[in-house]
Amino acid sequence: MQTQTSTTIIVTENLGKSVKTSNGTLHILSGINLQVASGESVAIVGESGSGKSTLISLLAGLDTPTTGTIRLDGKSLTDMDEDGRAAMRNQMIGFVFQSFQLLQGLTALENVMLPLELRGEVNAKQAAVALLGRVGLSERLTHTPRQLSGGEQQRVALARAFVSKPAVLFADEPTGNLDSKTGAKIIELLFELNLENKATLILVTHDQTLADRCQRIIRLDAGRMI
């Protein structure tokens, strides 16, 4: 493995995830050694069940590994408790889910303001309004998710992920629930915002067109990097 440089933002060593089942131990991921440079865009691809979503959940501190270590910006995620990982996510990470994961009782504006409010930032509304305008939703600020199309909901989710200017943005099948035309628009927006924010982008996708837009493609097969 290469030596870590000052521009490396994520490093994993011998990362593994297993779960106990009625049939014994299921190894979801095994022996993942990975380095991601700051500002790099990386696609994680592979068949369904190959461990892609589990890997980015681990890298984002949403889940904990069974074996191995993860370092994010030089700090060990694996040595932190849940509060520590939550603080790290709040400080450094944005996440876009296939299912959008918007809070149904909040408007588009309130959904985007939320990460900033949790950090106690005073200009939360101003920043959220500006970013929703940037993703073409200035006319939808007071609409709840139920009043928005799938593409509009994903644009709100993008705005929410980018509003806190994360160092690393994770996206799990960001176009998976969208038609191809809407998905293409979301891809353009994702890369535009990522470039503007100079963030590291790590995404899981079945879409080869989306994967090809990234600087590097990592392929998983049965929980191992190939």
Image: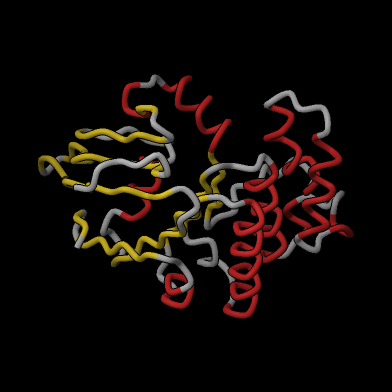
Q: Position of residue 196 (x, y in %)?
A: 66, 56
Q: Position of residue 53 (x, y in %)?
A: 37, 52
Residue sitting at the far bottom: 181
Decide: is 211 above or below 148. below
In the rendered structure, the answer to whether residue 172 lies left or right of residue 136 reads left
Question: What residue is rendered at 56% in x and 44% in y?
Answer: 94
Decide: is 124 above or below 192. above
Question: What residue is rendered at 59% in x and 72% in y?
Answer: 183
Decide: is 224 above or below 89. below
Q: Quadrant of the C terminus?
A: bottom left
Q: Position of residue 108 (x, y in %)?
A: 78, 49
Question: What residue is rendered at 83% in x and 52% in y?
Answer: 143
Q: Position of residue 7 (x, y in %)?
A: 42, 44
Color scheme of the displayed model: secondary structure
In the rendered structure, the answer to whether residue 77 lies left or right of residue 33 reads right
Question: What residue is rendered at 40% in x and 39% in y?
Answer: 6
Residue sitting at the far left: 24
Instruction: Using the rendered view, name the quadrant where residue 81 is placed.
Output: top left
Foreground: 37 or 119? 37
In the rendered structure, the answer to whether residue 90 lies left or right of residue 128 reads left
